[in-house]
Structure formats: C-alpha cells, structure tokens
Amino acid sequence: DAGVIQSPRHEVTEMGQEVTLRCKPISGHDYLFWYRQTMMRGLELLIYFNNNVPIDDSGMPEDRFSAKMPNASFSTLKIQPSEPRDSAVYFCASSRLAGVDTQYFGPGTRLTVL
Amino acid sequence: KQEVTQIPAALSVPEGENLVLNCSFTDSAIYNLQWFRQDPGKGLTSLLLIQSSQREQTSGRLNASLDKSSGRSTLYIAASQPGDSATYLCAVSGSNDYKLSFGAGTTVTVRA
C-alpha cells in the first residue's frame, strides 16, 4: 500500500483565499483524522471520521474550517477564507480500529497564508 | 482535558549512549499510549503502542514502559545511532473517544 496520500505538499496563498487540502487514507482503514501542527500549539486533532461520518469536530477552530469525506477513499479539509494564523502543517492520518490500531500519518501539507 | 508533557524538550548524546525519554499525562483514564517519531519535514511514524492493560512494549532497540497509575511512560533507545536523530512524540488515547492527545516532543540529536 502507498500509505496515506496528501496533496498538495505545499500551498502558498493569500489571505482571504479558499484553500482545499486533500487526503487519501489507506485502503481498508475505517477511521480518518485531520491534525494541525504549529510550533506554538504542537499537534492538535481537528476532526475525525468513522466510516465516512464525522464523529468529533470539536477541534475545528472556527466556522471557516470544514471537512468532508464523500467516500472511503477521499477526504478534504477546506479553509474559507484563509488567514495568516492558519499557516501550519496539516496532517491526515488513518487507522483500522481507533484505540486499538496505530494511526498512520501522511506526509502533511505545509500551508502558508500571506 | 488531557495534558501530555515531555521532558526534556531536547537532548544531545554521543553515539552509543542509551537514550531515556520521558512522558507524563494528567488523566490516567487512557485507552493506550503511543510513541511516534517525526523527521524534519515529514509525517509521524509509529514506533510502539502500549495498551492500557500492558506495562511495556519492545521493538528491537526500543523499549517503552507504561505506569498508568502515576501517569508516566518512558521510551528507552539502546545504543543510540546518528540515524536515531529525530523528534519523538508521546500520545495518549482517551478511554471514551479514542482521540489522541500529543506531547510537544523531545528532539534528539545523536552525535557521531
């Protein structure tokens, strides 16, 4: 398996623009997680899905952030409008069984909002 | 809210020395604890996962212990090598929701 795939790897955009980050989980994994990593706050869970259904989005910082999982092999994290404080590395991870199985992380998307 | 602390924040050792990385957490009601490795500019790689009912896990030169009652875990890396240089993160999974709470990490440098 190719592992968790994320695109783009790097994104530079201007404040106010819409940003869409994409993730393809490992085939057969029922759980998908979106994380954000910054120097100030470390690694934070934003939202996670089970069988394509959002289970907990309490980590989503504001209404500007939204996430979808239309099918088992694809998820998006959208920021609209983007702000400079959204600059961070965004990771997607997947696992077979949450709590029992480890989470497998993608390489991340480095987002810079100017 | 679960708080995870890792001490020290950074560590530099000569090659061949054993490494000891510490992790503490405030809420002992955890489902499991995991240790991850992160290389610069890369994602996280799982090293060891310890279920709450276990006391330790071993993989090669790595050994992780868990004392749930005191809220502590220790990662031991034997006979360190320059390739062990990375940031090591500890994460605990809540007993009710399986969400991972991460520590800030310990950045390790192994000098050749």
Image (tube, coloured by chain):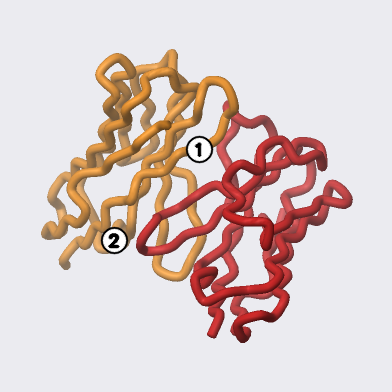
Chain colours: A red, B orange
Instruction: For mark 1, give the secondary structure.
Output: strand
Q: How many marks?
A: 2
Q: Amino acid at mark 1?
A: Leu
State which quadrant residue B41 falls in.
bottom left
Query: Dot 1 surroundings within 10 Å: few (below 14), some, or many (20 or more)?
Result: many
Instruction: Give the image location of residue B23, x and y in percent.
Output: 28, 36
In the image, residue A77 above or below residue B45: below
| Between A61 and A33, the one nearer to me in the picture | A61
Closest to the observer: A24 or A79? A79
Circle 2 crowding by C-alpha within 10 Å: few under 14, some 14–19, many from 20: many
Q: Amino acid at mark 2?
A: Ser
Q: Which mark is residue A111?
A: none
Pointer 1 chain:
B
Residue B66: percent from left, percent from top = 32, 23
Chain of the residue under label 2: B
Residue beneath disc 1: B100
Q: Considering only vertical position in the picture, is B52 above or below A75?
A: above
- Residue at (53, 85) in percent of width and height: A114
Image coordinates for residue B68, horizontal then vertical, percent: 33, 18
Q: Earlier in the sequence, mark 1 or mark 2?
A: 2
| Residue B6 rendering spot, x and y as whole percentages | 26, 43
Task: State the mark number for residue B85.
Answer: 2
Q: Quadrant of residue B1?
A: top left
